[in-house]
Amino acid sequence: MTQRHMRTPAALTGSSPFSAGLRRARLRVIACLAAGLGGFPLAGSAAPVPGEQGQPWWRHALIYEIYPRSFQDSNGDGIGDLNGIARRLDYLEWLGVDAIWIAPIYPSPQVDFGYDISDYDAVDPLYGTLADFDRLLAAAHAHHIRILLDMVLNHTSERHPWFRDAAHSRTAPHHDFYVWSDGKPGANGGRTPPNNWVSLFGGSAWQFVPVVGQFYYHRFYRQQPDLNWRNPAVEQTMFGAMRFWLDRGVAGFRLDAITELFEDAQLRDAPELGGSNAQGDPNLSDVYTKNLPEVHDVMRRLRAMLDTYPDNRVLIGETYVPTTEDLDAWYGGAQHNELQLPMDTLLGLGNKLDADTFRQRLIEAQTQLHGSQPLYVFDNHDNRRSWDRYGDGVHDAAIARIIATLLLTTRAAALMYQGEEIGQTTATPTRVEDVRDPIGITGWPKEKGRDGERTPMQWDASNGQAGFSANAHTWLPMTGNYRTVNVATESSDPGSLLNWYRRLIALRRSNPALHEGRTVMLERDNASVLSYARVAAAGSTVIVALNMSAQPQTVSLGLQAEGLRGSHLTTLLASPSTMAETAADRPLVLPAFAAWVAELR
């Protein structure tokens, strides 16, 4: 069994690029933790490894999304890169990360910041070289961290050689790699698009190419033509691209926009829903452009291909669906033969701190997924940060601890996004001339883009770029609070949000109930407090109680009625920290926005 966190990280011994100040800060944290602050030892138990207790590594994994442009710049050009990620592996291991998902690093014109790919089998020089990637892969392995790549199967860049070929002749070898239509007759002998579909990023979803006299379909930007997955050659070629990276040793993929892979073969007009969106386009049903049944045949074949590789490679899906029942289909239902971890975006990507809603989502995940493991996510590169979505402007720090506790104590794999653990905030541009994201440029002011959640990672206050870069002109500006909201400052504060995350991660790994126990919902009718028990097969039980209101709440957990035996509740982690041990059968008073994790003994 691989031992993890038992040694002093290189970041603390002077052999890593972390600053001396940060090393001293961490040594102080170690001293505090060794003295018992926080209720857990620094040295967590061994990391889950493939086959531990008969389960694959991803089932209990903590996966950390890295947006490479914004994580760490190693060459001073103001843009993050692969060598920058390698520099921060000590930190990721110290935090307790099992795998990193890296947003696209392939060659790209960067219209959509890498999600418009022009070569699937290489690395964009902006981020480094293929040799840099191989070195990162080896270094991550040495830190017990797996690497997952973002794979964009729905579309390519218009500059990809396939589309350049496709767009110059109807008889070109790659013409049928994309979705084309002759359109409809228009005025003065011209042509109009075949239907009313609109791009998610504004305007018609159809672009005319005079050379071939046809329109091509683009669900996203016009520079991102959709691939034609009804052509078997597309599937064969794209699976080959994934094999290229699997053969190099990546642990799997996050599949971008996977629900959009097919569109209606008859190209029927989408039903109108009334009103218009932020881009000024009519609101349309996506019944003909999203979640078509044909996509599941591809997912089953993709899963079968992936399963030919050793070491439990994994498929994660960007699966925005309306219900948990719809999410079950992406696992393959009772067959469990599609994605292992489609993202549950229903639980955490909302904006209302509501105990009833969270409770209902957790119950649905237990009862509607045929026993599949959920993957919960509260932050990513496409949504305002959870600090801002759930915060009330007054109790934001306490609410952030509630969100962290919910993410890391539920029965699920967990997905984090860089900066979430330090409380990094959304820094939405206030002027259209400062916007870099094209959707923000075209949709301003109703749609201001996604720059705000993509600002550089805040490492320290060593320079005006928060330690992210030596270049004063970073690709996006730093958030103004970087002097206090950063890894170095929070590492030295045992009461910081960063150390709250780290303690939760350690508890999640070392405590049998939190690691793999079943879930028992408590006080199901309480509209203010979400409480549940995690119960291990061996009998250990952990209680989690989260007060999602601005007033103190008294709760009676009813543990005996649920068959949970024990006389005392011993605090493992609490915010505020004054909450202490209590009798198991007595009412519990939770302060406003309190988060409490306790062991039933």
Image (cartoon, helix red, strand yellow):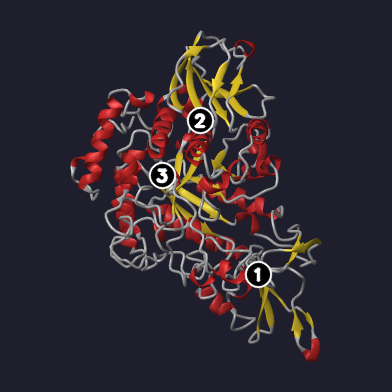
Name the image quarter holding residue 375.
top right
On the picture, is 249 further left or further right than 385?
Answer: left
- Find out whether the residues at labels 2 and 3 contact each other: C-beta distance under 8 Å: no
Query: Is residue 340 in sight in this rendering?
Result: no
x, y percent for residue 379? 52, 47
Tell me the quadrant of the picture where the N terminus can be found.
top left
x, y percent for residue 508? 44, 29
x, y percent for residue 335? 64, 38
For image coordinates 60% across by 32% down, the residue present is 549
Q: Secondary structure at mark 1?
A: loop
Q: Which residue is mark 1?
A: 202
x, y percent for residue 124? 39, 67
For image coordinates 65% across by 64% down, the residue present is 200
On the picture, is 330 further left or further right than 306?
Answer: right
Q: Which residue is mark 2?
A: 409
Q: Residue furthest top?
A: 567
Looking at the image, is 88 positioned above or below residue 598? below
Q: Give the alpha-carbon distance from disc 2 to disc 3, as whole Å.
A: 18 Å
On the picture, is 325 further left or further right than 442?
Answer: right
Looking at the image, is 146 positioned above or below residue 118? above
Toward the viewer: 274 or 410? 274
How many discs appear? 3
Looking at the image, is 584 positioned above or below residue 509? above
Nearer the observer: mark 2 or 3; the answer is 3
Tell which circle, 2 or 1, labels the residue nearer the N-terminal end: 1
Q: Which residue is mark 3?
A: 422
Name the image quarter holding residue 467.
bottom left
Amino acid identity at mark 2: Thr
Q: Secondary structure at mark 3?
A: helix
